[in-house]
Amino acid sequence: MNKQVESDRIVIFDTTLRDGEQCPGATLNVDEKLLIARQLARLGVDVIEAGFAIASPGDFEAVQKVAQAVGTEDGPVICSLARAIKADIKAAAEAIKPAAKARIHTFISTSDIHLEYQLKKSRAEVLAIAQEMVAYAKSFVEDVEFSTMDATRTDPEYLYQILELAIAAGATTINIPDTVGYTTPSEFGALIRGIKENVPNIDQAIISVHGHNDIGLAVANFLEAVKNGARQLECAINGIGERAGNTALEEVVMALHVRRQYFNSFLGRPAESEEPLTNIDTHQIYKTSRLVSNLTGMLVQPNKAIVGANAFAHESGIHQDGILKNKLTYEIMDAQSIGLTDNQIVLGKHSGRNAFRTRLTELGFELSETELNKAFLRFKELADKKKDVTDWDLEAIVNDEIQQTPELFHLDLVQVSCGDKSRPTATVTLRTPTGEELIDAAIGTGPVDAVYKAINRVVNVPNELIEFSVQSVTAGIDAIGEVTIRLRYDDRVFSGHAANTDIIVASAQAYVNALNRLYRALQNAESSSNSESQRRQEKVTN
C-alpha cells in the first residue's frame, strides 16, 4: 500500500473472520468463511484478516483458501494474525502465501498488567521480542502490521518506545488496540496524537486502531482517532466479536460517509469535497450484514444503527408526515445507499433458469452449477406459494442453500398435529447418505418442541438447545421465515439456519442443519483420535 494514498483516505481492515468469529457461537467452517470473504471483497474492504493460522488446522486452511480465492491482484490484502512467536509467524506466512497482496499481523501485550500476569516478562524483554519478531515477519512479507495489545492501558512513554523499534524493524502499519474497550473518545484521540508527536519515525507507518464496544464507545473512539491521525480502522460486520463486540464496520463507514464534509478537513481535503473517505461500496452493506448474520447465527437487533430492521422505519405520526413531505426531515441517509430496497423481481413460476441466474448475478451471487440448480428448485417451489417474489426472498433462498453443511442426515418429511385441545405430535423421516430411512415420532409442549424431540430420537446425539429465533424476511402471511438455532455439546456451540414459508419446516431444517455440523465435528474428532492412535501404535511397533 502507498502511504501517500492512505494519508487522505481511510483504510478499512475487516476482522469479521478472525476477531468476529471469536464471538461465542459464531464459529464458521471453511466454506462459510469463503462466502463471507468473497462478499467482503465485493464490499470493497482494503484488508481481510482471514484468521489466526496457527490456532488450528481449520483456521490455517481457511486463511489459505481465502488467500487463494480472494487474494487477487485487484482484490484486498489478505492478512493472518500471529503472536510474536516464530511458529505463529511462520504459519501465517505459509497460509497467506497464495495471496497477491499478503500481510502478517503480529502482536504482543504492552500494558504492565499484561506483562506481569499474562506474559510474566519485563518491559525490556518485550521490547526485544517485538523488534526480533517484526524483523522475522518482514523476512517473509513486505507488509507487516504490529499491534501493542492493551495499548490503551499501556504507559504512553513505553508505547512510544516499542512502536519506534517496531517501525525500525520493518512494520508498515502499527495498530493501537483498545483491547478491553476501556478508553473514551477524548483519551483515545489524545493517545493517537501523542503517538504522532512522540514517535520519531511514525511517518514511515500507517496508524491503525482496533476497538471493542464494552461501554458502547467503539465507533466514537474510532472517529476521534481519525481526527487525530489514524488512517486504518479495524472493524467487523454487525460489530460481532469478543464480549460486547468490535467496532461495527457499517456504523463507522456510514458515519464517515454521511458526515464527510465534517471529516474532510482532518484528511487534508477541501471541506466541500464529495469524494468518499473509504473504498467501501456502501450499497453492499445491508447484503453483507445479512450474510454474516445468517452464517454466524448472530441476529441483528431491530434498533441496530444502519442495518437494523427499524433503522429506516417511522411510526410517529409527526415523523411520518415529515418523511412524506421530504425524506430529509427525519432521514440523514437514504436506505438505498446501503443496498436496502423494496424492489421486486419480474420473475414468477414461469421464469426460466437463465433469467433466474441473471438476476442472482445482478444481486452479486456467484453460484456453482449444483448450487444454482438447488436454488432454482427452491425458487420454483416458492413461486408456487407466493404471488410476489422479492429480492429479499431470493437472498434468503440462496443464503439458505449455499450455507448448508454436508448432509449426514437429510430431512425427508416432517408432519405435525397440534391444536388447543390436542397434544402436539410430530413425525419425522430422515435419510442417511446410504439411503436408509429413519422414522420416529414424539410428543412435545408445542409443535417445534415435538419436531425436535422426534429428530433427537432418530439422530440420538446428546445436545442442549440454547437458542431458537425466528425472523420474517418480508411482510405478509406468505412471508419466508428464517429460523436460527444454536446447540451446545461438550462446551462447543453449533448453529443451524434455514428459511421456508412454513416455519415448522424451517425449524426442522435448521435443527437438522445444526445436528449435521455437530455430528460432522464428532466424526472428525473420532477420525483424528484414531489417526493419532495408529501413529502411536506404528511408533511402538517400529
Image (cartoon, rainbow, N blue to C red):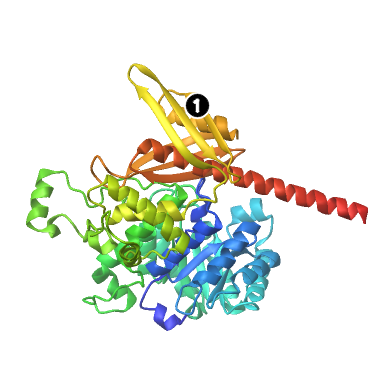
Q: Is any atom of residue 110 visible in this view?
A: yes
Secondary structure state at the residue bearing disc 1: strand
Task: Say if 382 sits above or below 453 in the image.
Answer: below
Residue identified by numbered label 1 = 441
Residue farthest along the top direction in this orientation = 421
For the residue pair 328 and 374, the one nearer the viewer reads as: 374
The C terminus - image quarter: bottom right
Relative placement, left or right, of 479 versus 199 is left
Residue located 70% across and 67% down the image: 86
Image x and y of residue 502, in percent:
35, 39
Counting other residues with Cα less than 10 Å from the Cα at mark 1, is it few (<14), some (14-19), or many (20 or more)?
many
Image x and y of residue 53, in percent:
62, 62
Image x and y of residue 384, in percent:
28, 47
Image x and y of residue 306, in percent:
30, 55
For the residue pair 45 and 445, the one nearer the viewer reads as: 445
Q: Is any atom of residue 109 visible in this view?
A: no
